[in-house]
Amino acid sequence: MPVLKELPKECTVTVVVDPQYDVLELLDDVRNCEISKIPIGSVPFDVRKFLTENRISLILTAHDASFIGALFLLAARKLGIASVYVPHGALSAEREKITGLKFIAAHAKADIFTYAARYFASGCLAGAARIWTRKFVSSRSIDRLWDVACAAGPASKVLFLKSGIPEDAVVVTGQPRYDSLVDIDAQKDKNSVMELLGLDKGTPVVVVATQPFVEIGLWTSAQRARFLELVVKAVIGSAGQPLIKLHPRETGVAGYRSLLSKITNVRIPVIKDEVDLATVLTACDALLTGRSTIGLEAMLFGLPVIIFEGDDATSKKDALDYVQYGAAVGVYSEKELASSIAAVLFDGKIRAGLAEARKRYVYEHAYLQDGLAAVRVASVIAARANTGT
């Protein structure tokens, strides 16, 4: 949304709205250009016809590896329509080893098209994506789906280049989502935030940012319950207090509360979207997560990060490179968890080392924190868009 606010007034924007994301209210704040909203379920099977009839001259996307996103980008390429990719979160080396259609093709072998249909709530369009991507993958070879990518930082650009993307197809802009964090004081009235969340003001807070591993089939419900038990007991055992922050795609706040009632008698807040992320991070002293962009967002608030995916994590090869940079503490065993959390909360030497590495990591992965990333992305768009939408 920050990018749309930086577009010139002569632009008209058509937003294909995915029902799983609550963006309608945010779109109402965009007043500098004309906005039209189309539910994804209303897009016809023939996406090329849709793009032509709506005079689309550029595709802007944050997702190039979903089947629906691929469908729009493939149609745009067929019609000679420009496209700009702004990754919504942190990139991993594993993800960028194969890009665009190569990524789609690799996952097509596992036939996860039902996953696309489930999350995009549009069986017709998901079917189109299935047919189009399979046909296109088998008949053509291209290095990417989009024309240019806006990399969040220099390290992200390096990942793109290593995967074979031409240098002139990647521009370092920073992440527009982080522009609004520039003016936030992480220590602003922390006591009132803790009171709002029902936290003890005298005890360090560790935010446990969960992942939708059950929803996407990576975990069973039993594994989720086990993970929750491990981290809650470890945080309490390290003289901290846990705050559970659910991923937007997760369901069942009540289910988490039920699990917690069986683990401890201590009241532990569980939140999903009742409180914005900035408020949550303002109140905490450290963050524990697995493979999530929220780790980087915590670093933007100057917070130490702990990476832990469960006691069955047998590999020290993390999905993201937080630990590799020295910007986070990696925990790969249940036995190490409580002591690692305590060290992050109370060991001055470890905290100082994390803080120094954190500065480097933020620059490499989120670039300049000057509030102007959206302006830079808008400039990339303006350089490639023709008259139209």
Image (spheres, rainbow, N blue to C red):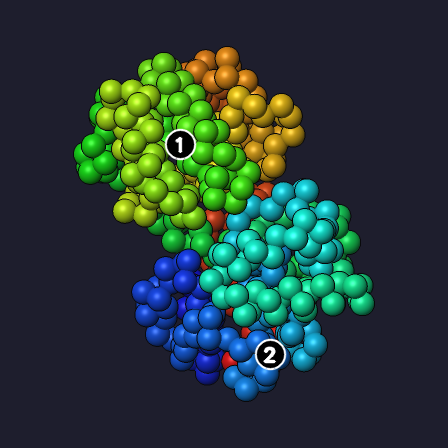
* Secondary structure of residue under mark 2: loop
Instruction: Answer yes or no: is residue 123 visible.
Output: yes
Tell me: 53 left or right of 304. Answer: right
- Residue carrying label 1: 208
Q: Is residue 78 above or below residue 166?
A: below
Tell me: 52 left or right of 200. Answer: right
Residue placed at 45% from the left, 34% from the top? 221
Instruction: Answer yes or no: is residue 191 visible.
Output: no
Q: Which mark is residue 46?
A: 2
Answer whether labels 1 and 2 touch (C-beta < 8 Å).
no
Q: Where is residue 200 in the image (x, y as percent from the top left)?
A: 22, 25
Residue placed at 69% from the left, 73% from the top? 77
Q: Position of residue 310 (x, y in %)?
A: 51, 25
Please rate how many residues cluster around mark 1, counting C-alpha atoms within 10 Å: few if below 14, some from 14 to 19, many from 20: many
Q: In this view, does 386 lie above or below 198?
A: below
Q: Residue 80 carries which label?
A: none
Give the residue type at disc 1.
Val
| Nearest the eye: 134 or 270 | 134
Q: Position of residue 194 (x, y in %)?
A: 23, 33
